[in-house]
Amino acid sequence: MTENAYTRRDDGDNGSKGVGGMTGTVLVTSGTGKTGRRVVERLTALGVPVRSGSRTGKVPFDWQDDTGWEAALRGTEAAYAAYHPDLAVPGAAEAMAAFGRTAAACGVRRVVLLSGRGEPQAAVAEEALRGAAGRAEVTVVRSAFFAQNFSEGALLDGVIGGELVFPAGTAAEPFLDLDDLADVVVAALTGDGHAGAVYELTGPRSLTFEQAAGELSRATGRPVRYVPVTGPAYASLLEGFGVSEAEAGFLAELFATLLDGHNAATTDGVKRVLGREPKDFSGFAREAARDGAWHG
């Protein structure tokens, strides 16, 4: 799942292939988002010049307004594309094609795209970027459901309130820690050997949302209960919180697609890139609790 409100720290040497192979400036789109800010932090720590693009930041970048894309990309060597709201939405493929053309015209050598695992429409957007990016190397990172959705995203309030209301049924998901995702993205941005690759990233084991709630209960020291609901019921719930009818319906449909069981298997994507195992969900929960994520 890509960079929206629902989607998915190791320091020092991460064992990735060829880190340090690129030294030019990197544009990080959605640079203040959950994945973007982690990528910015890691690139900065490596001494790589970074442009953090956002709608209101020093480097203006808005996925809904392509008039600023050329200025943001001009003079950069690589770019991290984290599309908002999601690569599965209508118009995302056209946006990816436009971004690819602009990147190619600006001489960008490398693009790393955040995509959703098991999203057919996201795959269409991936191909649109590849087809338009010219000679630029394109690497696609397909992520499982972000573990940090429980600590930074739309499920945060549910954990704090002790009730996770979500339309996941009994499907299992190999939740991915965003620190692992960011390490993979930085490896692909800065190292060689990733051109044309598609990395499917997951955590080391799959959990149902009920099991995840149990892990969160143990980490927080207070009960967290999973309450499964239907897609339409979830859409109505979102509308009650001010989400538009169209967006609420899209999200409910997206979760029905993603959480039907076809994404339950784990992959070795993190280990292939970084040479180590991904962080387990229980480790994420303990660290998030220690850092005060659920002190609401």
Image: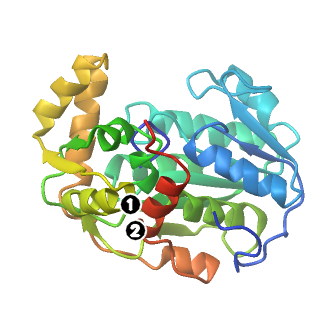
Q: Left or right? Give the position of 245 relative to 156.
A: left
According to the picture, the residue beneath numbered tag 2 turns out to be 282
Q: Residue at x 62, y 66 (%)?
A: 184
Q: Left or right? Give the position of 111 relative to 25.
A: left
Residue type beneath disc 2 = Ser
For label 2, count other residues whose C-alpha is less than 10 Å away and answer few (under 14), some (14-19) or many (20+): some
Q: Residue at x 58, y 52 (%)?
A: 113
Looking at the rendered structure, the number of numbered marks drawn on it comes to 2
The spot of residue 197 in percent (x, y) is 57, 69
According to the picture, the residue beneath numbered tag 1 turns out to be 219
The spot of residue 75 in percent (x, y) is 88, 41
Q: Secondary structure at mark 2?
A: helix
For the residues labelled 2 and 1, the Cα–Cα distance comes to 8 Å
Up the image or down, 32 lies above or below 71; here it is below
The spot of residue 214 in percent (x, y) is 25, 61
Q: Residue at x 51, y 68 (%)?
A: 199
Up the image or down, 85 lies above or below 192; here it is above
For label 1, count other residues whose C-alpha is less than 10 Å away and answer few (under 14), some (14-19) or many (20+): many
Whether label 2 touches label 1, CB < 8 Å = yes
